[in-house]
Amino acid sequence: MSAMEYGIVIAPRNYGAAGDSGYDYVEFAGREIAAMDGPAFEALCRQVTRGLPCLGLNAYCPPQVVIAGPGFDPDAARRYAEGLAARAAALGVRVVGVGSPASRTLPAGFDRALAWRQAVRFFREAARAFAGYGIEICVEALGPCYCNFVNRLDEAVRLAQEADRPNLGVVLDFYNMEHSGEADADLRPYAPWIRHAHISDDAGDPCRRAYLRPDRREVHARRMRGLAAAGYDGRISLEIDVAYDAREAARSLQMLKQTRTEEE
């Protein structure tokens, strides 16, 4: 059996409810962690030290922190990264995924070569800020339902390559990859860059990512086999936008573990 760890994305306000979920860790939204006032953040840190570890952050930044496009401000992006990195370290985070579609949606006619250079600088500076804490940063390819820039895994890998920092890789998000038509692609060529993974279904719309559906069990089993074929046995998080439901969370975890057992 592999050492794969299973996590769930959850809002800090629901952290206490996840304690008996069976997951190995939780993942919080980076933008929410960054926006907390000092006392609220300190209280959350105390909770985490007594319960499930927080090993990941997703939803990296709010729209006003621009990754690429109009309003790109490298100094503001660097300051944000430095502040969030310090908080991530205090929580015990090990990996941070950067999706944030509103921060990289380009208006019609925007110079894409310029956007690419901006994104390279953004990720280089973000990775530098987190490196001092031993935290990895991941570029996330987003489905076209979310934004219009860096929609495919090969683009995310190329961006990580050009930013060229040792703690920079990619997060595989099977839900986004499904919307880009590549969720069942051969992952082996990208293996050296895969640092984290996300998986989910939806509740009728892309903005309501939800628990894994029983009727899609084989779909998810196939994707877990793809991860195994690429040699990945790290962490995978169930990423949800819907309300936390302990029963559904446990059922999804059981499905993931069963599919992983079958391919061992």
Image (cartoon, rainbow, N blue to C red):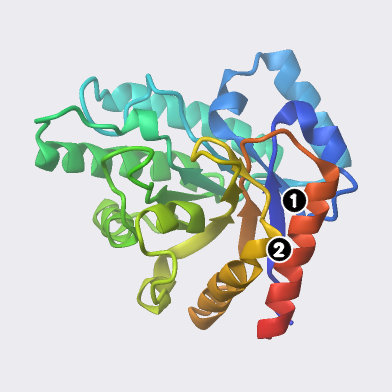
Residue 259 in view of the camera: yes
The N terminus lies in which quarter of the figure? bottom right
Which amino acid is tagged 1?
Tyr
Q: Residue drawn at (56%, 69%), measured in percent from left and top? A: 219
Q: Nearer the viewer, residue 66 or 126?
A: 66
Left or right of residue 223, residue 19 in this image: right
Task: Place residue 51 in its image quadrant.
Answer: top right
Q: Residue drawn at (37%, 24%), measured in percent from left and top? A: 65
3D distance between C-alphas at marks 2 and 1: 8 Å
Q: Nearer the viewer, residue 44 or 223?
A: 223
- Element class at badge 1: strand
- Vertical placement of 255 versus 226: above or below? above
Q: Nearer the viewer, residue 22 or 254?
A: 254
Residue 214 in the image, given as x and y percentages of width and height: 70, 61
- Element class at badge 2: strand
- Vertical placement of 248 versus 169: above or below? above
Give the labeled residue for mark 2: 5
| Label 1 environment density (alpha carbons within 10 Å; few <14, some 14–19, many ≥20) | many
Residue 79 in the image, given as x and y percentages of width and height: 41, 24
Q: Residue furthest bottom?
A: 264
Verify CB contact (< 8 Å) between mark 2 and mark 1: yes
Task: Place residue 221 in its image quadrant.
Answer: bottom right
Residue 169 in view of the camera: no
Which amino acid is tagged 2?
Glu
Give the labeled residue for mark 1: 25
